[in-house]
Image (tube, rainbow, N blue to C red):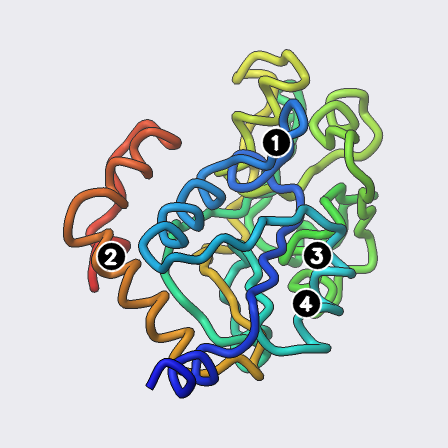
């Protein structure tokens, strides 16, 4: 039975993510964040000790497509990605806004209007980059590489707007030492849930056990405590549903 169980669970997991504070990021040489704490809590319950690696997004995607037993930490579950992974979650909900400088009077009422802006900053690794490209945006100015704070670029006037998830905003404001009122949301573009995503060749039993343990965390209150510690508020009823 042990042999069968081991085969069903597959090989050792490779757990990978890309830098998206406060969900997953490196601080003083240690990978941390809400999703990191959650994954490690699940690993404890599952007796799994695979390390979490922080890699550039193209490499993360390439690994997931090349082999089984790769776990992506916290990507958004969008219609475009639905069939590319096996999903465990949901873990959190994020709203993606077009942000502008507080002194910019621009009002956006549609994606059509946003397409007419002279340029739109956004992190290259973000799901909104894929999504807005698919919506026919020709004015996207992707920002790549670690250590570049997109809010600083917006404040410096590099482009009139920045597309960003609300979950990331505070961490980037803190890092840039900017007050919260230095930017404002001009348009809500997208709402999506963050999940854990397994490569499609991963055994269904492995994916199921991770989902079962997450459901258990939601029932016993440990998920809620973790969520509140990172976001300062309780998770929604939808997130707590198992």
Q: Which mark is residue 135?
A: 4
Label located before the other in sequence (1 or 3)? 1
Which x, y percent locates residue 47?
Answer: 38, 57
Q: Which mark is residue 238?
A: 2
Q: Which residue is mark 1?
A: 30
Residues under numbered marks 1 and 4 in contact, where contact means CB atoms less than 8 Å apart: no
Quadrant of the image occupied by residue 225: top left
Residues under numbered marks 3 and 4 in contact, where contact means CB atoms less than 8 Å apart: no
Q: In front: 193, or 187?
A: 193
Label located before the other in sequence (1 or 4)? 1
Residues under numbered marks 1 and 2 in contact, where contact means CB atoms less than 8 Å apart: no
Say if 84 sits above or below 184 in the image. Answer: below
The residues tagged by marks 1 and 4 sit, at their Cα atoms, a distance apart of: 37 Å
Q: Quadrant of the C terminus?
A: bottom left
In the rendered structure, the answer to whether residue 203 lies left or right of residue 205 reads: right
Q: Residues within 10 Å of mark 4 (few under 14, many from 20)?
A: few
The residues tagged by marks 3 and 2 sit, at their Cα atoms, a distance apart of: 26 Å
Say if 179 sits above or below 169 in the image. Answer: above
Q: Which mark is residue 86?
A: none
Q: In front: 34, or 78?
A: 34
The residues tagged by marks 4 and 2 sit, at their Cα atoms, a distance apart of: 28 Å
The residues tagged by marks 1 and 3 sit, at their Cα atoms, a distance apart of: 27 Å
Say if 171 sits above or below 207 in the image. Answer: above
Q: Nearer the viewer, mark 1 or mark 3?
A: 1
Label located before the other in sequence (4 or 2)? 4
Q: Which mark is residue 129?
A: 3
Q: Nearer the viewer, mark 1 or mark 4?
A: 1
Q: In front: 130, or 25?
A: 25
């Amino acid at each position: 039975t042990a042999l069968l169980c081991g085969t069903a669970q597959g090989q050792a997991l490779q757990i990978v993510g890309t830098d998206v504070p406060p969900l997953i990021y490196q601080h003083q040489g240690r990978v941390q964040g809400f999703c990191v704490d959650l994954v490690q809590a699940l690993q404890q319950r599952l007796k799994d000790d695979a390390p979490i690696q922080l890699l550039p997004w193209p490499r993360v995607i390439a690994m997931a497509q090349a082999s089984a037993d790769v776990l992506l930490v916290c990507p958004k579950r969008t219609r475009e990605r639905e069939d590319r992974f096996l999903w465990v979650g949901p873990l959190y909900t994020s709203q993606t806004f077009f942000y502008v400088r507080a002194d910019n009077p621009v009002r956006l009422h549609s994606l059509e209007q946003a397409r007419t802006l002279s340029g739109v900053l956004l992190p290259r690794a973000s799901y909104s980059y894929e999504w807005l490209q698919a919506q026919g945006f020709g004015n996207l100015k992707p920002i790549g590489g670690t250590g570049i704070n997109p809010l600083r670029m917006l404040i410096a006037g590099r482009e009139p707007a920045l597309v960003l998830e609300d979950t990331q905003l505070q961490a980037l404001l803190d890092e840039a030492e900017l007050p919260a009122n230095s930017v404002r949301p001009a348009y809500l573009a997208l709402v999506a849930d963050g999940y854990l995503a397994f490569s499609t060749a991963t055994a269904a039993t492995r994916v199921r056990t991770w989902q079962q343990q997450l459901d258990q965390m939601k029932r016993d209150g440990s998920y809620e405590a973790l969520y509140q510690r990172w976001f300062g508020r309780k998770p929604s009823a939808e997130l707590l549903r198992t």
